[in-house]
Amino acid sequence: MKGLEAISHYHGVSLAVLGVTVVFIALVVLAVIISRLHVVLGVWENPKAWLDQVRLWFFPEKPEKDEPPGPYFDDIHESARQLNLLIHAIGEPFSLPALIGKAEKIGISHAHSVVSHLIVSHLIVPDKKGYFYWNQKECDRLLGKGRERKRG
């Protein structure tokens, strides 16, 4: 047996492919080690900073819970009064985008949140046609309760 017949009989092609693969993988590993050598040396120089970084990876610090800026307000009397005046200026029925746009223009902060809260409080009610009305009865009830609370 000589030549290609011997190579085929003794699995020479598969051994050659295996050898090339081993050498290629070894070169890739060596390249990765050399490219990350500065990180390893940084750990060697300052292990405390590295430990702090690893600690943050596994146990991230929880941010303090900040309240979002006024999504709902405990006391909506002032907002109700301002938007009541604005709605009377716009006219009824009104659309919410128009109301929110005008409220932002005149400087009412968090206009979306205020309008949302007034809808939840039933001060602004839909007419089932895409427009809204101001519920004066609910406003009188709420503002009357607020005045009594301030007096008492």
Image: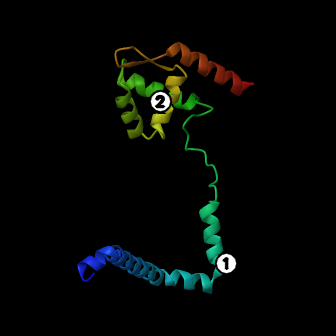
**Amino acid tagged 2:** Val
**Amino acid tagged 1:** Lys
Residue named by callout 1 = 48
Q: CA distance from mark 1 to mark 2?
A: 52 Å
> 87 or 12, which is in the foreground?
12
In this picture the colour scheme is rainbow
Position of residue 33 relative to residue 149, above or below, is: below
Position of residue 86 relative to residue 107, above or below, is: above
The x, y position of residue 24, in whole percent, is 37, 78
Which numbered mark, 1 or 2, is in the foreground of this view?
A: 1
The x, y position of residue 25, in whole percent, is 41, 76
Which residue is depicted at the point 39% across and 29% down? 99
Which residue is depicted at the point 50% across and 84% down? 37
Which residue is depicted at the point 46% across and 84% down? 34
Picture quarter containing residue 42?
A: bottom right
Numbered mark located on residue 115 in the image = 2
Please give left or right for residue 67 compared with residue 24 in the image.
Answer: right
Q: Is residue 110 visible?
A: yes
